[in-house]
Amino acid sequence: MMSAHTRRPISAKTFVGLVIVAVQLLPVYVTLTVALKGQTDLSSVWVLPAAPLWDNFAQALGAGKLARAFMNTTIITVAATALVVLLGALAGYPLARSRSRLNSVVLGFILAIMMIPALSLLVPLYVLMNRLRAISTFQGIIPVHVAFNLPLTVFLFTNFIRSVPRELDEAAFLDGCSVYSIFYRIMLPLLKPVTVTSVILTSVAVWNDFQYSIYFLQKSEMRVITLAINGFFGISGSNLHVGSAAALLSIIPVTVLFLVLQRYFVSGMVAGAIK
């Protein structure tokens, strides 16, 4: 007879899940071990130091001017995410409810835009922003992020709204609601899952952006998180340990955001991608 304390073998799904978690956390662990060591510590990156050097985090905030970079990144991320979600919802509602040929063409055009490599538009975009004197300004970089993150958001909102019964709109219309009232009073409360999904996807993309920021944010006072971290690495020399500390600090806000909103994320992704 088996003892009550006998452990059951780990199932294949659990084992695969643990392996995936370990692989995902491995870079974070290596970054942490490097961030807690000094430049003279040549021990393996797999081993935590006996005496952790927390001063690297203070240097990242001070010498690396990470606090200013955090503020700039937060302003850009919040503004761009709010505009993307608002415009995505406003565009997704008529595209989902009106099945006209024109709307089908518009939706197809939006999907086609998603297939264009963003960096292929870098040169003409830089020329345009330079003519508008929008280099190294919030009003220049925020519309760039909105433009490149909006197509996916419109696609998610459109498909999510299509899954909402049209009878709700018809009943509200018979009760005297206008199209705007139906959208704001009835539709918006139902869009929480896909809204959260769009917020997470957009905010993470904007927060981690490097390819646009390095070209369009050239002034030191406009540096964002990714550029601040990049500043610890150069041709003349680099500070890997302080740079690793800065990288760990930079992932805290988006990690917290995802943990708070994760229960809506999966349902929003599934409902937004499949009717």
Image: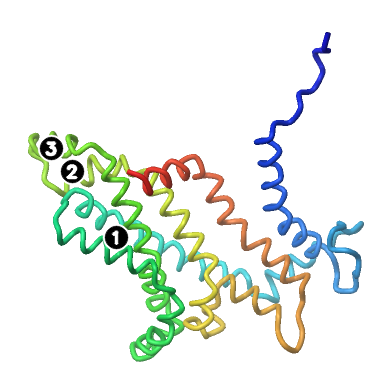
Q: Are marks 3 and 2 in contact (CB under 8 Å)?
A: no
Q: Is residue 223 left or right of residue 42?
A: left
Foreground: disc 3 or disc 2:
3
The image shows residue 17 at horizontal and vertical percentages of 66, 41
Q: Could you tell me how far apart the alpha carbons at marks 1 and 3 are, in whole angstroms?
A: 24 Å
Residue 177 place in picture, x, y as percent:
11, 41
- Taking the spot 46% from the left edge, 78% from the top edge, the residue there is 119
Q: Nearer the viewer, residue 207 or 114?
A: 114
Label at residue 182: 2
Indicate whether 271 appears above or below 242. above
Distance CA(mark 3)–CA(mark 2)? 9 Å
Of labels 3 and 2, earlier in sequence is: 3
Q: Provide residue 91's location: percent of width, then percent of height.
A: 25, 58
In this picture, is 242 found above or below 134? Answer: above
Residue 87 circle label = 1
**Three-letter residue code for mark 1:** Leu
Q: Nearer the viewer, residue 176 or 157?
A: 157
User: The C terminus is located in which quarter?
Assistant: top left
Q: Viewer-nearest of labels 1 and 3?
A: 3
Which residue in the structure is indicated by mark 3? 170
Crowdedness near tag 2: few (<14), some (14–19) or many (≥20) residues, C-alpha within 10 Å? some
